[in-house]
Amino acid sequence: MLPLNLHHTAIAVRDLDGALAEVKRLYGLEPVSRERVEEQGVEEAMIPLGGSYLQLLMPLSAESPVGLFLAGRGEGIHHMALQVADIEAALAHLGAAGAELVDTTPRIGGGGHRIAFVHPRSLASTLVELVEVE
Amino acid sequence: MLPLNLHHTAIAVRDLDGALAEVKRLYGLEPVSRERVEEQGVEEAMIPLGGSYLQLLMPLSAESPVGLFLAGRGEGIHHMALQVADIEAALAHLGAAGAELVDTTPRIGGGGHRIAFVHPRSLASTLVELVEVE
């Protein structure tokens, strides 16, 4: 189970418009997509950055996971995402290796990709997302 | 000033050997380099991941910046690094745009690259490193 790429690094923000404006003003970077992902309770923007993406996440409610993250820790880097070719094989491998899976089966994330999260307890308090891109 | 790539995402860890073993066991990923960067007070490992790297950082002392980060927040994602072609031009642009620079002139980081940090106050509480790779 070898991830193919660092698919994205995600930052939780309170104000998506404001954060996108700062990313443009400071770094000249612009999003290629922006969408509401209701199931995850976020509005997200994907900003291409070489072979990877910077993702900005804004919660749709204070009770969503990203809303709770903001309330507890404030803005900042929220997770990193690893690109895999076969997410079911990746989850099976991780489960067998004793990793603590937030999602034992894939769900649909931004861009229509199949995704799953691995609990921060499994690697240095770092929330890891798997993203299937064939 | 357009960054060329998401050069790496860095995780602060207490036990570099243990974290490397977990990254290998769970994800099959191995470091391409490991070095002590005395000036930054860290021992760091660079793990290739597609067109980017996962970096693991272990402090050399409790008083180093990463040591203080661990004491205050525990393990977790510490910063993200943007690859630039001309770090002096990038710093001049960011300074003119009002970004708060931790380093106003480049210093030497891992791999001998010229690096500089931009304060988390300038973008959603996110510590951003610039890495010059020509």
Image (spheres, coloured by chain):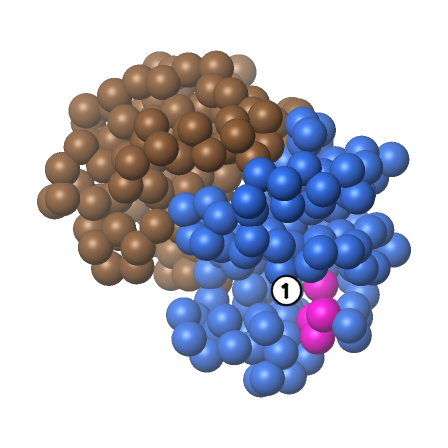
Chain colours: A blue, B brown
Residue B113 is covered by the magenta coloring: no
**A127 sits left or right of B131 in the view:** right
Q: Position of residue A117 (x, y in %)?
A: 64, 55
Q: Magenta stretch?
A: A40-44
Q: Residues within 10 Å of mark 1 (few under 14, many from 20)?
A: many
Q: Position of residue A57 (x, y in %)?
A: 63, 64
Quadrant for residue A48, please give it. top right
* Quadrant in which the N terminus of chain B appears: top right
| Residue A65 drawn above or below residue A131 | below
Q: Residue furthest bottom?
A: A62
Quadrant for residue B59, please give it. top left
Quadrant for residue A94, please give it. top right
- Residue for point 69% across, 59% down: A103
- Residue for point 39% across, 24% down: B45
- Residue for point 20% across, 51% down: B68
The chief SS type of the magenta part is strand
| Residue A73 drawn above or below residue B84 | below
| Residue A90 is at least partly visible in this image | yes
Residue A43 is covered by the magenta coloring: yes
Of residue B18 and residue B116, the one placed in the foreground of this image is B18
Q: Chain of mark 1?
A: A
- Residue for point 38% across, 56% down: B120
Instruction: Tell me the residue that label 1 is attached to.
Output: A57
Amino acid type, residue under disc 1 in the picture: Leu
Q: Position of residue A50 (x, y in %)?
A: 68, 32
**B5 sits left or right of B54 in the view:** right
